[in-house]
Structures are given as structure tokens and as C-alpha cells.
Amino acid sequence: MWTVRGLVKSYPAGRPGGRFGARGRGPAPTAVRANDGIDLDIRRGEIFGLLGPNGAGKSTLVRQLTGLLRPDHGTIRLLGHDLVAHPERAARLIGYLGQESTALDELTVALAAETTGRLRGLDVRAARAQRDAVLDELGLAPLADRPLARLSGGQRRLACFAAALVGDRPMLVLDEPTTGMDPVARRAVWAAVDRRRAEAGVTVLLVTHNVIEAETVLDRVAVLDRGRVIACDTPAGLKATVAGDVRLDLVWRDEAPLGLPEIAALRERAETAGRRWTLRMPQERARAVVASVTAGPAFAALDDFTLATPSLEDVYLALGGSEKGLVKA
Ligand SMILES: Nc1ncnc2c1ncn2[C@@H]1O[C@H](COP(=O)(O)OP(=O)(O)OP(=O)(O)O)[C@@H](O)[C@H]1O
């Protein structure tokens, strides 16, 4: 389906200090290696995810996989086509929902869907029929005559998703499709994706920051960090690598009681964010810590605590991910 080998893409570095600054001073700036030797195999009918922190190289990878950006090195094959030699072929195979919608902003919801269908080679009747079907399917019919620029962020995203579905492409590439959507819209998106997979074997490549969503909808996921794939497996397979561990969150009322030796010792191992401490540890140890903080003097200083099984975020950290986490700031 999609076969990627040895993909490398660098961007030239910006000059430190801007246009006029730092000329002739210090070492020459080095280029950013946004993708640094990526291999991937995405199979037909799969919902495949790219998960990683900001700047990991997800959008750079997606733009090459959709023929919008030329790699420095490496090969990309899609359904037998060489996309490095023939990037224009991607447009006929892929329905792409990027992060920006500005190209469609002046159109109404109905016209955005219809125009996309026409651009993808449908005749007027087919484009209108598909427009009506997809707007109904996604609950967008009441907004059909509103320009995209005058919708809420979540509604606009849903309208762009609707347009991406028109023309029945065998591949869908969705870059954070559900950002800003309410739960009803999110469910409509995943139901529409599922239906196309079941009925037409559509393959979906999804970029996401949302760990919970990734665990729920993905068949397989590649975890990206600093331009490299650091793991690739099913969400369950990845989580099995940290199965023995749990996450313990402690929230203090005010200051943590660092005068208590057991609390001072925990502080060494905790990731802290204001009053919240996060600890990852084996279940047995976590039980002992909970017992010690809920009994005795520490309890008076405690506002709340939670114990949770590992998420893909914990997997990312256990794999040595370079950022503090995956959640978008
Ligand atoms: N046009 C560009 N010029 C220079 N550097 C760029 C450009 N686009 C991206 N980069 C850099 O390349 C790296 C990868 O960026 P990319 O946008 O692919 O990451 P991402 O994983 O999609 O991030 P996000 O989650 O924030 O969308 C980052 O260090 C980024 O600063």
C-alpha cells in the first residue's frame, strides 16, 4: 500500500538573530533534520496513526506521503506508484485533510464539498449527489448554506472533513481531524471513517496528539520523536511494553510536605507541574506509596490522588521520548 524507505528531509536553518543579526559570528547554523531515516509499511484497510510531540516531524512526513513535499533521500511507493518521481499522482489517490482550511474559507459548506468533488473529476450530478449524502451523514445539512469562514472552529473542521470524503479516494490522510470538535462531531467522523473502511477498504493515515483517541481508533501506530520512528505496533502491543507500571498522580493542597523524609524521597522521582506530581512505577511500589501518603501526616497536605494504567503517553516516555509528553501545549 504505502511503502516508505530511508526517508530523509532537512529544512535549511534560519539565521540566528534574524535578518541582520549574528552575521559572521559563531558557528554556521545547522539544518533541521525533520525526518531522519524513516521506514514505514502501511497496509490496505488499516487506520494507521502517527503520534509524537510538537516538532517530531509528523507534518513533514505527511506532506511527503501526499506528494506535497519532495524528500532529500529515500523512496515512497503508494499503490504501485513511485511518489518521489511522480508526486502529482498522489492527488488522484488521496483525500487529504490538512491543518489549514483557508483555501475553502470563502465557500459555503455545500459548495466546498461540491467543488472538491468537481476538482476530483466528478460530473455535476455526481458531485451534488455525493455532497448531499456526505452532509447528511455528518449532520451538516443545517449548515449547508453557511460560508466556512462563519462557522465555529469545530464546525469548520467537520465541513473540511466532509469535503475530503467527496470523490471516494482509496486513501484518507487526516492531520488532527477532530481538533476543536465536540463529542457528537467526533463520533460522526469516526463512524464515517469506519464505514468507508468496511465498505470500500479505505486506508486511513491519521496524525494525532490525542493519546486517548489514538488508543481508541488506531489499528497500528508509529511513534515519532525527533524525526525518527522510535516504535511501531498496535496500541495494545506498545502498552504491553510498560504493562507492569502504573502512573500515580498526587495533587497537594498547597506546598508538598517536604519535611517528611518519604515525601522528600518521592520528590526526586516525580515529574512536577505546580501542585501536581506524576510518578511512574511498578504496581507494588505504587501501592506502598499510596498507603504511606494516605496514612499519617502527609494526608493532611494531599488534595487528591489518582492511580492509572499506562497510556501511550507513558509508552512514549518509557521509550526515551525527548519531550516531557505528547500533549499539545
Ligand atoms: N518550513 C520549515 N522550515 C524550517 N523548519 C521547519 C519547517 N517546517 C517544519 N520545520 C521544522 O522541522 C521539524 C519538524 O516539524 P513538523 O511540522 O514536521 O513537526 P510535527 O510533528 O508535525 O509538529 P506539530 O505537532 O507541532 O504539528 C521541527 O523542528 C520544525 O521546526
Image (cartoon, helix red, strand yellow):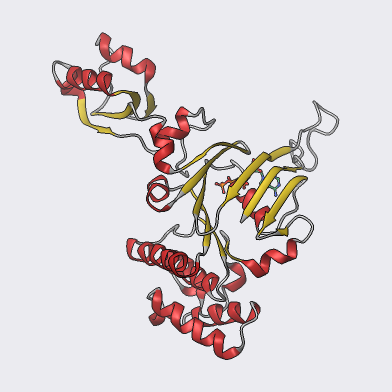
User: Where in the figure is residue 102, as x and y percent of width and height?
Assistant: 60, 68
User: Where in the figure is residue 19, as x and y percent of width and height?
Assistant: 79, 43
In this rendering, does residue 312 appear at all? Answer: no
| Residue located farthest toward the top when viewing the structure as drawn | 261
Compared with 74, 274 (above or below) is above
Q: 175 or 27: which is nearer to us?
A: 175
| Residue located farthest toward the right when viewing the structure as drawn | 24
User: Where in the figure is residue 59, as x and y percent of width and height?
Assistant: 61, 50
- In which quadrant of the rendered view does residue 66 lie? bottom right
Quadrant containing the N terminus in the rendered view = bottom right
Residue beneath the point at 44% across and 37% down: 238
In this rendering, does residue 198 appear at all? Answer: yes
Compared with 210, 172 (above or below) is below
Q: 152 or 1: which is nearer to us?
A: 1
Residue beneath the point at 40% across and 81% down: 141
Q: 181 or 63: which is nearer to us?
A: 63
Q: Quadrant of ligand 1?
A: top right
User: Where in the figure is residue 318, as x and y percent of width and height?
Assistant: 45, 28
